[in-house]
């Protein structure tokens, strides 16, 4: 390996770190049995460190240190990246999440490749792996591919050979690319974003502290979301977005920050990665600004509004325009990138991402993984909340990460999300069953 410049979009993400909010993704894998530290270290050294980005540190060069490069670590040592921790004897899941919060609040050492793995003993006889990496290494689709290359898929004779499945929101990519062939629509959508007013003040914006708090929902069966989707003619990602909107609406009501004409925008990553580049790593996505339907009181009305607004995103070329802008700013000075970051950060209050994970059960270093999830970062100076939707083994989990000063109880948002899904499911079950087409014809 030789030193080489970061791709412009990866460089833009490398410079995305705010004073206290870093662009670091935090993931969690849990097992019913404690992980074998030596075995895990060997697996990561053999499989993860074989991917060159995980053996390279990022070095900034140029007169103003604005040209980041991948520089191979000739003396790479896996022990500098794999750490072993133990929870107290009577710890529970809240103690594990407290540890994840502590880790998520710490920047990664700049002198090493930008990732860490923390093997955790507990709670009880269970085990966990907390994995952290900087967003410049790759986006959600790229990291799902890394998971498939590092973990073993049970019931597969060649566990790391199967193709990456396209995430739900990635289906938007092809229509976007077709619509942006001339670039006119993409530039128009980008101009529209630039002209949007700033998102109004909310508990998710304001002064931040150097502390993150994380939370997660219970695993919700995808079959339940499919039943909701079937009743209301909506895809699973639409159901999830509607439930997020309902949870945030109720959270604002409870904090006394809700008003009748409330507006809450989410910065939503949309994958533009062609399937043939599934194994390439890096960042291949654009961003779209989504108006969450928090102003609507009825859950079904929110679902219909979410379906309509996501369809508008699908028809637009906004994500492609944003992707071009990242490419342009990634080639320029860091100061210019920071100005653009503040400009676009002011347009939204949270980051909302949706990634489809593996369907089959995974194992790691001989231990079956019963839960897998992640927390999306909310870097910069304006956005204080990140919400991630991730599916694994037929269940969907919501991850919430927020600035501790702005969102002191993110678990409340996770519980409200569960309540929203339950309310939509009850409404779906109460809907009249649609008569099969052959019966209607007779």
Image: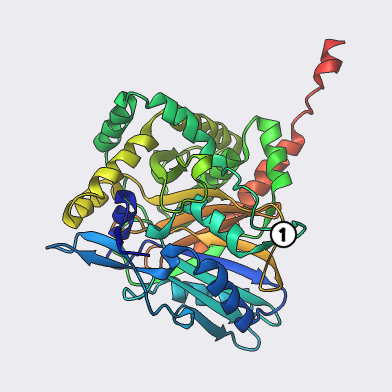
**Vertical position of residue 159 compared to residue 239: above or below:** below
In the rendered image, which quarter contains the C terminus? Answer: top right
Locate the N terminus by quadrant.
Answer: bottom left
Kindly identify the residue that appears in the image at 31 percent across and 46 percent down.
200
Depth check: give the residue in front, 124 or 164: 164
Residue at the top extreme? Answer: 442
Q: Residues within 10 Å of mark 1 (few under 14, many from 20)?
A: some
Residue 395 against residue 62 in the figure, above or below: above
What percent of the width, then of the height, locates residue 290? 42, 39
Q: Nearer the viewer, residue 202 or 13?
A: 13
Image location (x, y in percent) of residue 168:
57, 41
Can residue 263 be seen in the rendering of this structure? no
Residue depicted at x 62% and y 33%: 234
In this image, 240 relative to 293: left or right? right
Q: Which residue is mark 1?
A: 361
Task: Note whether 318 is above or below 267 in the view shown.
Answer: above
Question: Where residue 144 sits in the image (x, y, percent)?
Answer: 55, 55
Task: Label 1: state its secondary structure.
Answer: loop
């Amino acid at each position: 390996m030789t030193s080489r410049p970061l791709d412009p979009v990866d460089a833009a993400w490398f410079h995305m770190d705010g004073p206290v909010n870093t662009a670091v993704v935090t993931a969690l894998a849990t097992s019913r049995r404690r992980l074998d530290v030596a075995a895990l270290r060997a697996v990561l050294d053999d499989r993860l460190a074989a991917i060159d980005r995980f053996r390279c540190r990022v070095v900034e060069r140029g007169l103003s240190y604005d040209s980041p490069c991948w520089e191979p670590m000739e003396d790479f040592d896996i022990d500098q990246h794999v750490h072993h921790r133990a929870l107290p004897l009577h710890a529970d899941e809240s103690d594990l999440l407290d540890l994840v919060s502590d880790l998520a609040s710490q920047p990664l050492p700049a002198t090493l490749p930008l990732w860490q793995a923390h093997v955790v003993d507990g709670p009880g006889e269970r085990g966990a792996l907390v994995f952290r990496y900087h967003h410049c290494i790759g986006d959600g689709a790229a990291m799902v591919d890394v998971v498939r290359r590092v973990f073993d898929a049970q019931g597969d004779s060649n566990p790391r050979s199967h193709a990456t499945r396209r995430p739900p929101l990635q289906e938007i990519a092809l229509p976007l690319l077709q619509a942006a062939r001339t670039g006119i629509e993409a530039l128009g959508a980008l101009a529209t974003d630039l002209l949007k007013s700033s998102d109004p003040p909310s508990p998710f914006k304001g002064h931040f502290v150097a502390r993150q708090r994380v939370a997660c929902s219970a695993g919700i069966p995808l079959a339940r979301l499919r039943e909701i989707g079937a009743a209301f003619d909506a895809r699973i990602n639409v159901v999830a977005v509607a439930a997020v909107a309902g949870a945030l609406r109720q959270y604002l009501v409870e904090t006394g920050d809700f008003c009748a004409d409330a507006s809450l925008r989410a910065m939503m990553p949309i994958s533009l990665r062609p399937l043939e580049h599934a194994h390439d790593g890096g960042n291949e996505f654009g961003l779209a600004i989504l108006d969450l339907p928090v102003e609507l009181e009825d859950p079904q009305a929110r679902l219909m509004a979410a379906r309509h607004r996501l369809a508008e995103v699908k028809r637009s070329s906004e994500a492609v325009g944003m992707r071009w802008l990242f490419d342009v700013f990634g080639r320029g000075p860091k100061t210019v990138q920071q100005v653009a970051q503040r400009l676009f950060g002011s347009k939204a209050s949270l980051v909302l991402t949706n990634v489809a994970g593996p369907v089959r059960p995974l194992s790691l270093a001989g231990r079956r993984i019963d839960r897998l999830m992640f927390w999306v970062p909310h870097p910069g100076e304006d956005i204080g909340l990140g919400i991630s939707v991730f599916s694994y083994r037929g269940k969907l989990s919501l991850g919430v990460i927020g600035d501790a000063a702005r969102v002191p109880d993110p678990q409340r948002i996770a519980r409200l999300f569960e309540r929203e899904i339950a309310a939509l499911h009850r409404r779906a079950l109460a809907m009249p069953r649609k008569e099969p087409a052959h019966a209607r014809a007779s």
